[in-house]
Amino acid sequence: NGREFSWHEKLAENLDCNTYFAKPYHSWERGLNENHNGLLRQFFPKRMALDNVSEKEAFRATDLMNNRPRKCLGYKTPFEVFAKMTGEDYFLNGSVALMG
């Protein structure tokens, strides 16, 4: 785990939640992350240079993923679940990555 996690204790305290870290090389401890990586590979193949991906392409991929029905969400989309939980339905513009 890198420096980006150095404030995890403060963040957990502020959010009143627990934090968990996967062990290195234990991909089965990061199931959701690994699943999303696979979904992203549909748009951006593994060896693709991401510095060549335009902002428009990245937003399009995010929008498609956010509006893809998920079995774990009762075949609703992450966008639908987020909108219902928060009452915010204006995030459809692709500017927020909702993964579920």
Image (cartoon, rainbow, N blue to C red):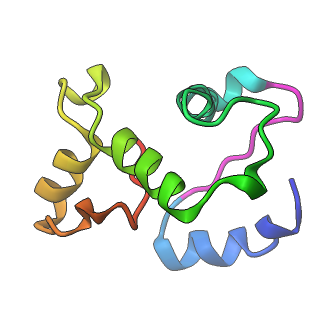
Residue 86's quadrant in the figure? bottom left
Q: How many marks?
A: 0
Q: Quick check: is 21 in the magenta stretch?
A: yes
Q: Nearer the viewer, residue 80 or 29?
A: 80
Residue 53 sits in quarter: bottom right
Taking the magenta stretch, the answer to whether it contains residue 61 is: no
| Residue name at image x 27 percent, y 41 percent | 67
Majority secondary structure of magenta residues: loop
Which one is nearer the viewer's eye here, 25 or 12?
Answer: 25
From this view, report whether residue 21 is shown above or below residue 75.
below
**Residue 96 drawn at (x, y percent):** 40, 64
Q: Which residues are magenta?
A: 18-26
Q: In x, y percent, where is residue 68?
A: 29, 33
Quadrant assignment for the C terminus: top left
For the point 77% across and 37% down, the residue is 48
Residue visible at 24% across and 30% down?
73
- Residue 40 position, x and y percent, is 57, 35
Q: Is residue 14 toward the left or the right of residue 41 in the image?
A: left
Residue at x 53% of width, y 29% of height? 39
Q: How far across and how far down the image is residue 42, in percent?
A: 55, 27
Q: Is residue 56 left or right of residue 40?
A: left
57 left or right of 75 in image: right
- The image quarter in which residue 78 lies: top left
Answer above or below: position of 37 versus 28: below
* In the displayed structure image, the side of residue 77 where residue 95 appears, left or right: right
